[in-house]
Image (tube, rainbow, N blue to C red):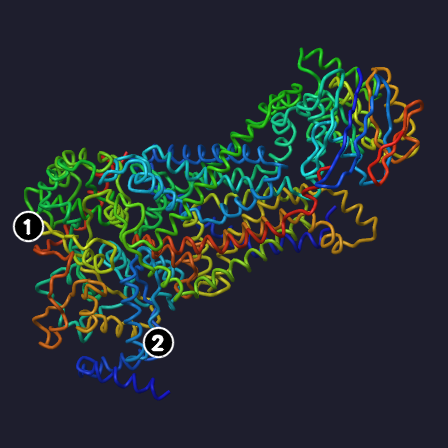
Amino acid sequence: MELILEQVSISLGNAVLVQPFSLAIGAGETETLMGPSGSGKSSLLAFIAGDLPPPLRGQGRVRLGGRDLGPLLPETRRIGRLFQDDMLFPHLTVGENLLFGMARRARAERLSRMREALAAAGLEGFEARAPHTLSGGQRNRVALFRALLAGPEAILLDEPFASLDMDLRNSMRSFVFTHLKERRIPSLLVTHDLADAPAGGRVLTIDSGGLVAA
Amino acid sequence: MTTISRRRFLSLAATAPFARVSWGADWAAIEAEARGQTVYFNAWAGSEAVNAYIAWAGGVLAERFGITLNHVKIADAAEVVRRVRDEVKAGKLEGSVDLVWINGENFRIMKAERLLFGPFTEALPYYRYVDTDGKPTTLFDFAEGVEGLESPWGMAQLTFFGDGAKITAPPASMLELVDFSGSNPGRVTYPAPPDFHGTTFLKQMLVETIADRTVLSMAVDKDQFVAAAQPMFAMLDRLHPFLWRGGEQFPQSQAQMKQMLADGELLMALTFNPNEPANLVALGELPSSTIAWQHRDGTIGNTHFLAIPINAQAKAAAQVVANFLLSPEAQARKADLKVWGDPTVLALSKLSPSDAKLFGSKLAQGGVSEPAPAIPEPHASFVPLIEAAWLERYGA
Amino acid sequence: MKSSFPQAVGIGLVALLWVLPLAASLMAFTVAAFDLPAWSGLLHHPQLPKALLLSLWTGTAGLALAFAAAMLITMGIYGGARWQKLQVFTAAGLSIPHLAFAIGFGFLIMPSGFLGRLLAGGSEPPQWVTAQDPLGFALIACLALKETPFLIAMAWSVLAQGDVAPALRGQWRSARSLGHGAGSVWLRVLLPQILPRLQWPILLVWVYGTTVVDMALAIGPTQPPTLAVIVWTDLNHAAVDINGRGSAGAMLLTLMLAAIAALIFFGLPPAAKKMRDFMTAGPSRLRVPKTWAVFLTVAMIVIYGLVLVTLAAMSIAGQWPYPQFLPDTFRFAAWQNLYSNSGPAVLSLALALACSALALGLTVLWFEVVAARLDRALTIASVASLALPALAVASGQYRLFLDLNLTGTLSGLFLAHFTPVFAYVFIVLKGPYRAFDPRFRAVAHGLNAGALRFWLGVKAPLMKAALATAAAVGFSVSMVQFVPAQLIAAGRFSTLPMEAVTLASGGARALTAAYALTLAVLPALAFLLVQMLGRPRWSQAWS
């Protein structure tokens, strides 16, 4: 599985926020995109995911595993997303949050997969807890597994570690990248902290003119 | 300054013939006490013509008698009954109502509950001109003795109206109305009781169908009523299938019927003011081809009155207002179709020729061309029985 | 933890200005309603069973349609470019008084109205059974159309709330990246979160629809009418025993509503299990029926526009015989009347401003200093005060004010307006206010901001949409108060609705329409102001 961007650009009216550029992210690879705030990094992720709000406009082609994502709705692109905030649904329990994106099949099977994920996240017994009773790190792990359980073919990470303290940040980074690598999911990370970038991945930068360079 | 006093002088001079007759010392004392008082006159305000007339009276009263007339606009006189009752119950002697426009059921209740000031009406100077012989309903309000507790103000008689361009032979009896409805299905109706006009329509039918009319002036019990009303309900059973919505739904009020007539949904409407159709023509709300008629053998008629609650604050001024509204000047203006068109309670024969001349007798467009006699209201005990029986038969 | 002194002050003020007068009114009403002959009279009323069923049916169906329409429109337009424009429509829709809408709508659909003239033609109106149909479909349509903007506005005040909106948008994107279609996100993520905050406004709409009198009189069934109309007729009567029957009827209707509400409340937990299963059943590609939402919105705007045009035409029509599309003659007497008699409009305006300001201040004070667990009691009292017929509550209040010598005074008149205004403002504001993220307070305290600076600098700006909507609702509620005001004013003061209702009793359609339009215009201005003030600056902050 490969995430391929071909001559992708973002503009607002006549102003070009991100100049056309191309990029291919292989299975299990994580590329990092850095740049000043307001440079259009988050808009680029929104364009890839399919929910760039007007009046922002994106152009170019996005392909995932041979599929052209252009005409697809966000929910059919199979692109998972992680944000700076965990975005857990406050009206659902931890377990229910994990079930939320899991494909429909026999209930018993879904429940056992959910519990496996809880165990993998080190959160056994947290199933019926409300998200706000968890610590920040715990919530971030739930958010990651919620995204993984939906079976994504790519993952976009928008400053996912920015709100964590230094210790947690380090453990969370390796936790996330290990899981992505294991599952051979291509991912694109937006950050302004070079330390976030995983070893071995390429680092791209956007300058104030919107030029993307490796 | 000078212009105002000059205008005031002229208007006083112009009205001099009926402004000052010597009424005696008692009345002079009342007028003296009334000067400077404010009268809160609670009167139904659903008509621009009525409101304008009351505003005119207020201007004259301020100028001539130093009384401030405040028209408290109400939608239903029952509101005033409840208000006065509550005030009296709460021991409030300075009531909020000084004068109320009233008749029928509301008067009966206020009288029975001793909520009225008086008797005062026969001491009003202009009362001597009231046509108590020719208009007996000035003494008996829905068969309830007036006993000086309310002062006659205007006359009412059940009247039908419609567009003469569409109605060539207006039905002049209930029997003819059934035939008329049969040939114009869905275009005739009446307001559902207990709306006052709806109940009157049923009373009219009772009067026209009852075997022995003498029963109507007496108190009846349920069994007597069932026997007496049997022909009325037989006729209603025949009439209803031809009515608007097949007689299964009815308008809520006369006001609604009037509007439905103007919109063309109905062929005819009814009113208690025989001059209302002519007034509506004069105001431009109905076409000039409008005609009004009454039933050949007469229709139900009554009188509306002014009463003073027992806890009124300005009783003297309220009497002066009631007296002024009874004057030939005020009554003639009220009877004028272009003003309001409410028929007078006075006997023109009792007036001086110059006063009588104020009442123009010309027939206006939309007026009743062949007035029929007024029939007194059936005894008050009929009303709840008619309403309950109607509801039982047609309401559910 | 709320400290006890401010809390006592808050409770005391609300008790003095609102709870005590209301409690005394309810007491008087309850005494009147527990009268044995009155109940016997009520139970022997031949129209009772059908009338009661009609009340429940019209109110419930009206709510169901309004809710469905409001949610469909909100779903279809939420977050899009039209989202802000929609608020202008809800403002206009909210501000038209119910009665005015019913009159205008009636003239659209009745056989001799616009539709009849357009579709049927001929020299005489068709004999359609449109307005005042026996099953109350016209009333239901009217209620649904009139309440939809209210429910949209309530949903908006939650969705646009400063601290909630960004979180909801983030959740929206998350849910879609997890494979859920927009429709599925609504049903599984957004609605379950906003519904708890809409429950009281929804209850209010239901209670209003089942007890409404003026609309039912104008456009509802007549034989039998709804129970509320029978109650109203009985309470209006001059005779004490018939008033008693009316009070018993009002009590029956209230008990019935309370019983049904309780049944739903206690029946909800079992249903909630099914709801949770539904929410976690996994992704569904369900989409939002955008076309339907846009169609519905356009249809509603067209109907509202036609109602306003109809009212305007009616206010200047002289003779307007069937089947002409325009009046034959025009009269401007109605507008002249209004213009020459502007005192009532000024008084109404002043009362509305004062009432909504005090109600907003008192409500905010309550939320700030009183513990949340006491909300429920006040909410139930608010809904109860709005569920009982205005005439029943007003006559109790009137007797109290008589003893206090408040009738015929400006302060009495103010309190009579204040009672319903406070109830509405409290219900409208409760959901958003209590949902405010408490972490902001902690953050502000950490930044050395005191309580007042926090409220003015952080909370009020974030809560702008909800505060402004509540104030505007309070304003428009005050503008249409009639029954209590009429009793308490004792003829010493006259407000715009008093003039309008008494004039309407004679069926003068032009005057009624002119006053109705004026009654609509003033609150409409209030709502438009709200849209300008309440628009969050971060509304475009999607990315």
Label 2: chain?
Answer: B
The percent coordinates of residue C255 (x first, y second) are 45, 37
- Residue C40 visible to an observer of this rendering: no
Query: Considering depth in this image, is C146 or B198 the residue closer to the camera?
Result: C146
Q: Secondary structure at mark 2?
A: loop
Q: Is residue A197 above or below residue C460?
A: above
Q: CA distance from mark 2 to mark 1?
A: 47 Å
Disc 2 crowd, CA 10 A, few/some/many (<14, 14-19, 20+): some
Q: Residue at x 21, y 80 (%)?
A: B15
Q: In the rendering, at what x and y percent does residue B213 appear?
A: 7, 47
Say if residue C101 shows up in the picture.
yes
Chain name for mark 1: B
Q: Amino acid at mark 2?
A: Gln
Q: Which residue is mark 2?
A: B37
Residue C92 image point, x, y percent: 50, 48
Q: C334 or C85: which is nearer to us?
A: C85
Viewer-side residue, A30 vs C212: A30
Image quadrant where residue B250 sits: top left
Is C155 positioned to the left or the right of B100 in the image?
A: right
Please tell me which residue lies in front, B344 or C260. B344
Three-letter amino acid code at the position of disc 1: Asp
Element carrying mark 1: loop
Does residue A214 appear to the left or right of C182 in the view shown? right
- Which quarter of the rendered picture does the N terminus of chain A lie within? top right
List the residue tagged with mark 1.
Answer: B297
- Count up the numbered dots: 2
Residue A22 located left or right of residue C360: right
Q: Residue at x 18, y 33 (%)?
A: B241
Q: Position of residue B6 (x, y in %)?
A: 30, 87
